Image (cartoon, grey):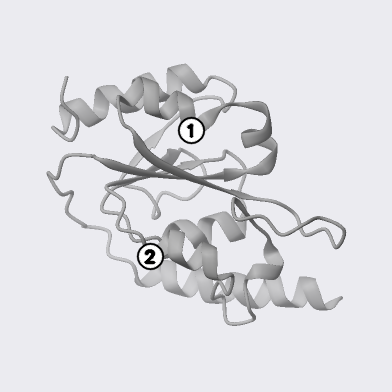
Amino acid sequence: MNLSKLKEARIRRKFDKMLSRLEENSTVSKKEIITVGILTTDEISSKIELQSKVESILGIRNSKIYSFKKFDKSATVSYKHFSEKDMNWNGTFVQPNFQIFLAQPFDLLIGYFDVKNLYLEKAISQANASFKTGFSGINSKLYELEIAEAVIKIDEFLLELKKYLQILEKLKN
């Protein structure tokens, strides 16, 4: 087993232990959504104009996006991407820009990925957001609202999200 697999296994154990301690009966705040954070993969963000779609469909101007990208030695450092190398052996993110993103108090955090990804799931769990939503089938303990839709159907996903946020009185009509 190489070191990266060993590191990932250690982080997975710590993450699973942390998830088992999470409360199932968390309360949903009635705070109106003004700021939005989006966590996704580089593959999705390079194909879809996710940030502009979120802003136009939800009617929000304050959104920020960060993407997970597999580590590549030849790639330049980006303030919009993070990789598995940006997490230490204890499961803590060490990239300063990404730490700032996770510490921001978002009213809504969207986990826009439909394939299990330890690093994205860990980022969702550490993010300072009052309401978290994402795709069903990833990890039900991470989100207050899960939506079953295909990743390529961004408009349908966001319209469904908008409908539920209006029902929860977190978005104005």
Which residue is nearer to you in this view: 13 or 46? 46
- Please indicate whether residue 171 sits to the left or right of residue 44 in the image: left
Graded by Cα atoms within 10 Å as few (under 14), some (14 to 19) or many (20 or more), the crowding at tag 1 reads some
Q: Residue at x 25, y 28 (%)?
A: 164
**Alpha-carbon span between mark 1 and mark 2:** 19 Å
Question: Where is 79 relative to 151, above or below?
Answer: below
When the figure is inspected, residue 159 is found, relative to residue 43, above or below; the finding is above
Image point (23%, 31%), residue name: 165
**Which numbered disc covers residue 28?**
none
Q: Quadrant of residue 115?
A: top right
> Residue 73: image x %, image y %?
85, 63
Circle count: 2
Residue 42 rendering spot, x and y as whole percentages: 67, 42
Closer to the chain start, of discs 1 and 2, is 1
Residue to which mark 2 is pinned:
103
Q: Which residue bears the numbered disc 1?
A: 51
Secondary structure under the numbered disc 1 in the rendered image: helix
Secondary structure beneath disc 2? helix
Q: Quadrant of the C terminus?
A: top left
Left or right: residue 158 versus residue 5 is left
Foreground pick, 154 / 149:
154
Amino acid of disc 2: Ala
